Amino acid sequence: MSVQVLHPAPYAPAISLPAPFPKDALLPLSLAPTNRNASLSQITAEIRDLKASGRIQDLLDRHGAIYFQNLGLKSADEFSEFAHAFGWKPHEDIGNPVRRTILAKNVATANEGPNTLPVYPHNEFGLSPHYPAYVLFYCVVAPETGGETPINNSVLLYNQLKERHPEFIEELEKRGGVKYQLFHPNGPRDQTSSAGTTVLQAYGQHVLDTDDTETAREKIEAEIRRLPTATWEWVNRSGANPLGDLRIWEVLPAVRNHPRTGQPAFFNNVVSRFLNALKDETLFPPHLTKDGDFRPPAFYGDGSLIPREYLDSAVEFITQNRSLITWKAGDVVLLDNHAVQHAREPWTGHRKLLASLWDEA
């Protein structure tokens, strides 16, 4: 690799990807400035050159993720400038299940859930037909302990599941993929969850304080209709809650072919829904928490329960083949969302991670 500013650099958390990946495929590949004093303008100029030459795409197709070390980014604005250098189209969230606070242009907090709870492996917006092609995370403050971002390769996961459980892959196709429930209360956000955005946080960007209930509902439903696979129902409507809470169902493929390599990937949020259901003790019917909340796992597309043995295998493979991204302040990781899942470990201290989501240009 011949570059002027960035060069490959050792990164201890990186793992070698097994066959069928090339022998030198690492998850993630790491790049660092040759000169620690390289300016942001020099770094972004090289990113633009690498993107224009197709080198960034080649590296992502081979490795799935790139970890940029020692960038020295000092703010959300500098991260925004770095992210924009790739020249992709900013992703627009539709129905975000997690709350994010915008801090700079196309930059927001990654997830505002409690630091004591993990976020389980998933493709970003894998439970939606509208998902980003690329995800960048930037570390503002490194944790005192923990706080890693585990990543795993979705193509490798598909291959391993198909080898051990070919009938599972066949059933996913026969039964119409996977079915997710998304629930948005019309009230305070659930501060005990990493998800849990309210109706208005998820779909109410056009709702005005002066709108009556029916007008607000019409605007919310118009936003939901932008997701062509979504069906929904209003629940818990009462005098104190005339709008009601919102339950949305999505039925989507569990396997998608990578748009450039053509490789099939286990692209979804099935594992995260499975592990959350285990935590909440809602894996089996009636899927109710101790407080009576309906929190099911993901189902087959026809609404039937996915046998646990397949999901246990998926967790086993992810654990065996994941890279635990450890953070230093100022560093960035770039993920090809089609090929890589990510998660979050609990931490202590004041860890702060920002996210920037992008689509193909």
Image: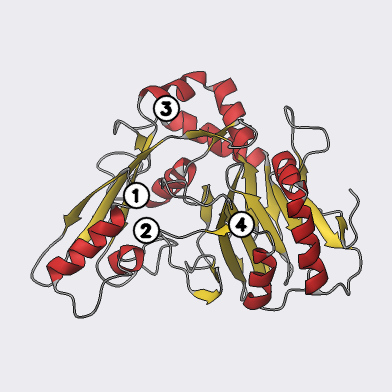
Dot 4 amino acid type: Trp
Q: Which mark is residue 215?
A: none
Structural distance between the alpha carbons of marks 2 and 1 = 9 Å
Give the labeled residue for mark 1: 227
Residue 43 point in image, percent of width and height? 80, 67
Structural distance between the alpha carbons of marks 3 and 2 = 25 Å
Q: Earlier in the sequence, mark 3 or mark 2?
A: 2
Residue 38 point in image, percent of width and height? 86, 72
Q: Which mark is residue 172?
A: 3
Element class at badge 3: helix
Give the labeled residue for mark 4: 88
Q: Earlier in the sequence, mark 4 or mark 2?
A: 4
Element class at badge 4: loop
Element class at badge 1: loop
Q: Earlier in the sequence, mark 3 or mark 4?
A: 4
Dot 2 amino acid type: Gly
For residue 224, what is the image quadrant?
bottom left
Is residue 13 among what the camera can see?
no
Q: Earlier in the sequence, mark 2 or mark 1?
A: 2
Of badges 2 and 1, nearer the viewer stands 1
Mark 4 vs 1: CB contact within 8 A: no
Q: Is residue 154 left or right of residue 178?
A: right
Mark 2 vs 1: CB contact within 8 A: yes
Pick whichever, 152 or 193, lies toward us. 152
Q: Earlier in the sequence, mark 1 or mark 3?
A: 3
Of badges 4 and 2, nearer the viewer stands 4
Structural distance between the alpha carbons of marks 4 and 2 = 21 Å
Residue 36 point in image, percent of width and height? 89, 71
Of badges 3 and 2, nearer the viewer stands 2
Give the labeled residue for mark 2: 95
Element class at badge 2: loop
Pick whichever, 85 or 8, lies toward us. 85
